[in-house]
Image (tube, grey):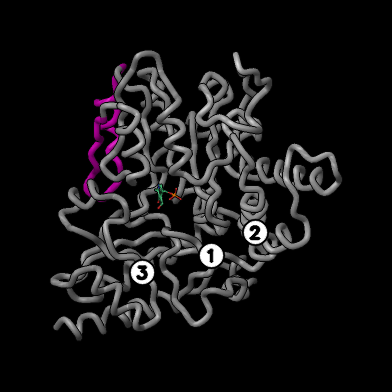
Amino acid sequence: MNAPARLNSALSVRDQFPAIAGWHYLDSAATAQKPQAVIDAITNAYGRDYATVHRGVYERSAAMTQSFEAARAAAAHLIGGDESELIFTRGATEAINLVAARFTNGTRKRVLLSALEHHSNIVPWQLAGYGIDVVPLIEDGRIDLDAAEAMANESHAIVAFAHVSNVLGSILDAPRAAAIAHKVGAKLLLDGCQAAPRLPVDVAAIGCDFYVFSGHKLYGPTGIGCLWGRAELLNAMPPYQGGGAMIDQVTFERTTFLHAPGRFEAGTPHIVGAVGLHAAIDWTNAIGLDALHAHEVALVNECRAALRDVPGVTLFGPEDSAGIVSFAIDGVHPHDIGTILDDERVAVRAGHHCAQPLMEVLGVPATARASFAAHSDASDIEALVQGLHTVKRIFG
Ligand SMILES: Cc1ncc(COP(=O)(O)O)c(C=O)c1O
């Protein structure tokens, strides 16, 4: 299979990722490798342009403030939102913790999650004291929205689903999920960690209330993530952490707070992380998320077809999954698959992928997972299949 024309025009897409030279990197769902443009932006932000934001009166600080706020706008626009509603966090995990800890919906104390959620979309709700109802999956590994509709009720403060599963690659019918939540007065939070790097996202068209994603899965740096929320919801939520930068007036008797997003960004932010994320978003937009999605869907199709020819392979997830293929081989632990593939310079993830409840549903302790990105191509799939034949030879 060849990459689609727009990506091919940059055979150089692969060459733009210095860290994958001589390697078949199939673990982009865990963290994406960084194109040179992002590495350069980070280097320049520290090495040439560095200063604090929001407080300095000198020119360099004003310029960095502009860059920081431009990054916010880019992150908001990436998902069809407004910058006044985009909060920088340390990652998707912190973003969900923030909502779980601070959002309230009257006296409702239950949340509706699905069986395929990442631990980041389970544990924060438990820590915040919510009871959890779990929507099952349909046969091919998508969230059963008929069941969700039957289960949603007025005890649910929030419905919180992965937009794309990090294990199965299954894509949620997000507008329908929004309608299901809103019908019972609940809000919809989407965990967009795997969707934001893989699909065009439009929070307005979806009709969701909160959307979270991580910079490092979107070709950007670690330590920066995004929480988008509707302004009226964010501004009704009390601050998550206190400190500098999030206040209006402070006295020892009483403190007043900024509106969102400032009220949720206590302390000096991850300035360079935001600049790096902006470069990553520009890089992604230059390719186009439609083209990226088509590229990864084609790779998934090719990968699933090739894996079917390897004896003893079980494939998980729907045929039309987004950039992610989970599989198992009869009688071989996924960790052994990962270790043998590593000897052949193929990097896959093996384990429960921070989705232990989903492993129970699948009836396995772990899976092996190949996940794609802009730089992936047919040579990665060939190397994977060759490696799996080695696994078969070793394990008989
Ligand atoms: C679906 C999903 N949600 C949440 C997370 C957590 O993201 P982070 O560790 O970047 O906060 C991940 C990361 O693996 C993920 O794949």
Q: Can residue 266 be seen in this view?
A: yes
Q: Quadrant of residue 174?
A: top left
Q: Where is residue 98 in the image (x, y as percent from the top left)?
A: 46, 33
Of 304 and 30, which appears nearest the observer?
A: 30
- From mark 2 to mark 3, how far is it between C-alphas? 24 Å
Hey, which residue is sitting farthest front in the picture?
Answer: 252
Give, as a three-letter code, the residue at label 2: Trp
First in sequence: mark 3 or mark 1?
A: 3
- Quadrant where the C terminus lies? bottom left
Q: Above or below — where is 215 with respect to 105?
A: below
In the image, 81 versus 252, the foreground residue is 252
**Residue closest to the eye, 230 or 312:** 230
Question: Badge 3: few (under 14), some or many (20 or more) residues near its Cα, within 10 Å?
Answer: many
Q: Which residue is drawn at 32% across and 33% down?
A: 127
- Above or below, 275 against 367 in this view is above
Q: Distance between the residues labelled 3 and 1?
A: 16 Å
Instruction: Give neighbour class at mark 2: few <14, some 14-19, many 20+ (Cα, 10 Å).
Output: some
Residue 129 at what x, y percent from top left?
30, 27
Residue at (29% x, 18% y) in the render: 155
Whether residue 40 is situated above or below residue 395 in the rendered picture: above
- Residue at 64% across / 42% down in the picture? 268
Q: Are marks 2 and 3 in contact (CB under 8 Å)?
A: no
> Residue tagged by mark 2?
283
| Magenta residue check for 261 | no
Secondary structure of residue under mark 2: helix
The residue singled out by tag 3 in the image is 348
Question: Was residue 134 drawn as part of the magenta stretch in this picture?
Answer: yes
Q: Do the residues labelled 1 and 2 touch (CB within 8 Å)?
A: no
- The residue wearing badge 1 is 374
- Asked if ligand 1 lies within 8 A of label 2, the reply is no
Q: Give the range drawn in magenta.
A: 132-154
Tell me the kind of residue under disc 3.
Val
